[in-house]
Image (spheres, rainbow, N blue to C red):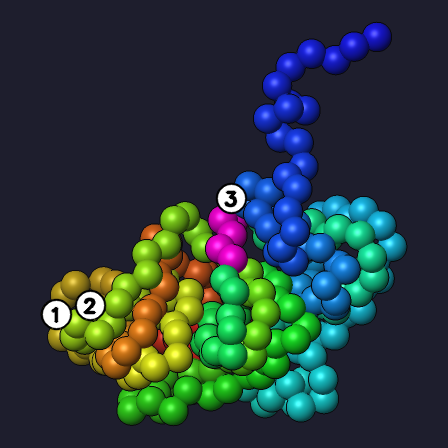
Amino acid sequence: MALHGKLFNDHSEISSTDQFALQNKKLLKIQMQFGPVWARSGSMVAYQGDISFKNKGSGGLGKMFKQAVTGEGVDMMEAQGTGELFVADSASEIQVIYMENDELSINGQNVLAFSASIDWDIHRIQARGAAMTGGLYNVVLRGTGYVAVTTKGDPVALDVSGGNTFVDPHAAVLWTAGTRMDVKVDTGGLKSMVRGGTGETFQMAFAGQGYVVVQPAENVPHASGGGSSTGSGIGDLFN
């Protein structure tokens, strides 16, 4: 008996010596011999070898306390063992970044996986006007290792050094160290009333030296705790 067709040739596993390697735009392979990794809970679609998973929730007592207080966070699991781990998130496109003693601020809904060598935490953004939104929180990664984020479609990396750059909060994926983020409130016009429903819209204003990555679609905010979210939805940006 024989099988014919392009499936097994065109979509065969791609070999790589890197810890993180894309199999295609929507599927990531992680080589476990490089050590443990953090991955979004439920993102495992397959693995080969001997890999164990521990659901860490928001990761540690400190981070769990922050999530309880702020209603923000991202559920993570720790994977360790030997073999190859395949992760994805609802067929979203995946972008792989290698950090070398650097820092990223990432929308929690876009975090897919990162090396365990990278330190992470949930931080409140100290930005003028942020109090009007009920508070802004993000996931901050620091250190050296691989990071994988998801995007809805092909993103654009905007260099903010040329002047002020304004981004819809639900379209912002991440920004790099060296950027400054503020909150702009637009209170006028029919357009803002239609767009925001309250006569106010919020944009994230970026400046400094670095990049902000924007996806061509919005993350849908999630209400926390069964109640309504605060801050016209901006508080859910890093839910």
Q: Nearer the viewer, residue 29 or 67?
A: 29
Secondary structure mostly seen in magenta is: strand
Could you tell me which quadrant the N terminus lies in? top right
Dot 2 corresponds to which residue? Answer: 192
Q: Nearer the viewer, residue 161 or 130?
A: 161
Q: What residue type is labelled 1?
A: Gly
Q: Can residue 225 be seen in this view?
A: no
Q: Where is residue 81 in the image (x, y as percent from the top left)?
A: 83, 61
Marks 2,1: beta carbons within 8 A: yes
Residue 189, numbered label? 1
Secondary element at tag 1: loop
Residue at the limit of the structure toward the left, as seen here: 189
Q: Of the residues tagged 3 and 1, which is closer to the observer?
A: 3
Image position of 42 (left or right of 158): right
Secondary element at tag 2: helix
Q: Which amino acid does label 3 sit on?
A: Lys
Inspect the magenta stretch and tell me whether residue 38 lies in it.
no
Which residue is located at x 72 percent, y 63 percent?
A: 34
Choose top left, top right, bottom left or bottom right for residue 30.
bottom right
The first of marks 3 and 2 along the sequence is 3
Q: Give the range drawn in magenta.
A: 92-96
Which residue is located at x 32 percent, y 61 percent?
A: 157
Which residue is located at x 59 percent, y 69 percent?
A: 145
The first of marks 3 and 1 along the sequence is 3
Q: Can residue 103 be seen in this view?
A: yes
